[in-house]
Structures are given as structure tokens and as C-alpha cells.
Amino acid sequence: MLKTIIIEDEVLSAEKLRFLIAKIRDDIEVEAILPSVADAVKWLKANKADLIFMDMHLRDGKALEIFQEIKVETPIIFTTAYDQYALEAFKEFGIDYLMKPIVAKDLERAFHKFDSLKGGAVNNDEMLNYLVNKLKDEGQKNFLVNSGKEIKIVPTKEIACIYADGKSVYLLNTDGLKYLMDTTLDKVSTLVPKFLFRANRKAIINLHRISSIENHTYGRLLVTLEPHPHFEIIVPLERVSGFKASITDKR
């Protein structure tokens, strides 16, 4: 049996991938599902796998941080919501990718490419360096949201804000429509481009959708968006400097 691991912090995504793997291949066993950089590093230091499925972003940071801690020579299939520049990297360096949401035919294609490697170690260094440089200042171009039983794709440029309400996270688009997201605000903040700013612990806002900024108490700022969510957006004093810098360099 070939051994694979899934490095993924979204439980439903990981379980769906495990199910698809079992459905397509009876010679590949999922040894572990690892939700964080720390968990992945710990497992890889003590164990070996024949294949790795890896989400680009994890609960405690970017998946590429794993390679700063340990050298990995195992073939990697990334699961990603990134598009053009990621695809170019994977094609150029011969590492496959699965765009979320993952479907069976794409997984079969990835396994075919994996089989063509005929085992043995691979050198991920060049591909990883390429991705690090590409991902440094760029953010995700689309986000997945839930709309009843349907999963919709929302382009990042159409986001007015993303906010937490209790234990749930919602996306408010530029048309004023609200959608539930299957993620955390902390994870989203690692994915967004510069024009989406983490205003406070509750909200990430689109700087291009600001209609007014007012001075508030204790050096804080009151921000109004168009469209605006159902709550006030207050930028705390410790974030004001970064907020103003982002406003003058929004792109």
C-alpha cells in the first residue's frame, strides 16, 4: 500500500478528499489528516509518505512554511483556490494541483501524473521558491461561499467585507448580499490582497468600498462602507497607523 497524508485544516474538505481517494484508489491509504503547519512538521519529522496532499493555507500559517522547517522530497499535490500564477508554477515544475472544490475527475488526473513519476524522491526547492515569490504580496482571487445547498464563487474584487458574527463568518458582497463561509476570519486574513484590510478582530474591509471615515473616541476611527454591514466598523488605535498607510497605498 502507498501511504499519503492530507495537510488540510478544513474538516469537511479533508474528509471529502479522503472519501474520493478511497473511491478511486484501493492501493493508497490515508495515514493522517494534519490541520496545521506544526502538526505537519511534527509528523513528517517522524514518518514518511509516498504522496502529500497539501492545502496552501493552514490554521497557523502558510503551508509553504513547512519547508522552512524540514526538507520534503515527497511528491506534492496542492489543493488550492489560487488560479493563474499557481497553475503556471505547477505546470512548469511538474507538480500537480487540485482546484477547490475537488472533483473525482481532477483527482484521477492527479493520480495519473503521480503514477508517471514512477516513485522516488523529487526536488521541490525550485517550485517552492517560485511560489514563495509569487505569493508574497498577492492574495486569493476568489472565495467560496455557501448559498443554501449551492457553493458559489465570489471574486475577491466583489467583496465589501468579511466579518465574524459569533462563531460564524460571513461575506458581504458589493451588491449587499450576505453569504456564509466555511472558514475562520484569521485564516481569511492570510489569504486576502492588500486592498482588503483587517480593520479589527471582527471585520476585514474592502478599502475601495469606504464611503466615509470619521474620528471616533480615544483615537479610534469610524469607517462606513458601501454597502455597509449591520454593525459599526471601528478601527482601534493600534490599527489606525496601518489603516492609514493602506489607504494611501490601496491597490
Image (cartoon, grey):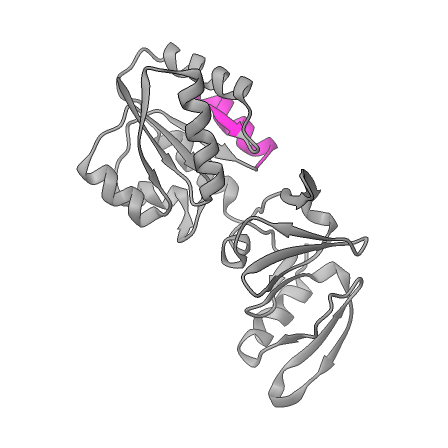
Judged from this view, the residue extending furthest toward the bottom is 218
Residue 113 percent location from the top left of the image = 43, 14
- The count of marks equals 0
Residue that appears at 79% across and 56% down: 176
Judged from this view, the residue extending furthest toward the left is 46
Where is the N terminus found, in terms of image quarters?
top left
Residue that appears at 58% across and 47% down: 139
Residue 109 percent location from the top left of the image = 50, 15
Where is the C terminus found, in terms of image quarters?
bottom right
Q: Is residue 250 left or right of residue 6?
A: right
Membership of 85 in magenta stretch: yes
Name which quarter of the figure residue 150 lies in. Answer: top right
Judged from this view, the residue extending furthest toward the front is 149
Residue that appears at 58% across and 58% down: 168
Is the residue 130 above or below the residue 109 in the image? below
Could you say which is closer to the camera, residue 213 or residue 104? 104
Name which quarter of the figure residue 15 lies in. Answer: top left
Residue 133 percent location from the top left of the image = 47, 41
Q: Is residue 222 left or right of residue 78?
A: right
Q: Find the magenta span and give its range.
A: 82-98
Membership of 165 in magenta stretch: no
Q: Is residue 93 left or right of residue 88?
A: left
Q: Is residue 181 left or right of residue 52?
A: right
Residue 116 percent location from the top left of the image = 39, 10
Is the residue 107 above or below the residue 164 in the image? above
Could you say which is closer to the camera, residue 46 or residue 177? 177
Residue that appears at 22% across and 30% down: 48
Is the residue 108 above or below the residue 19 in the image? above
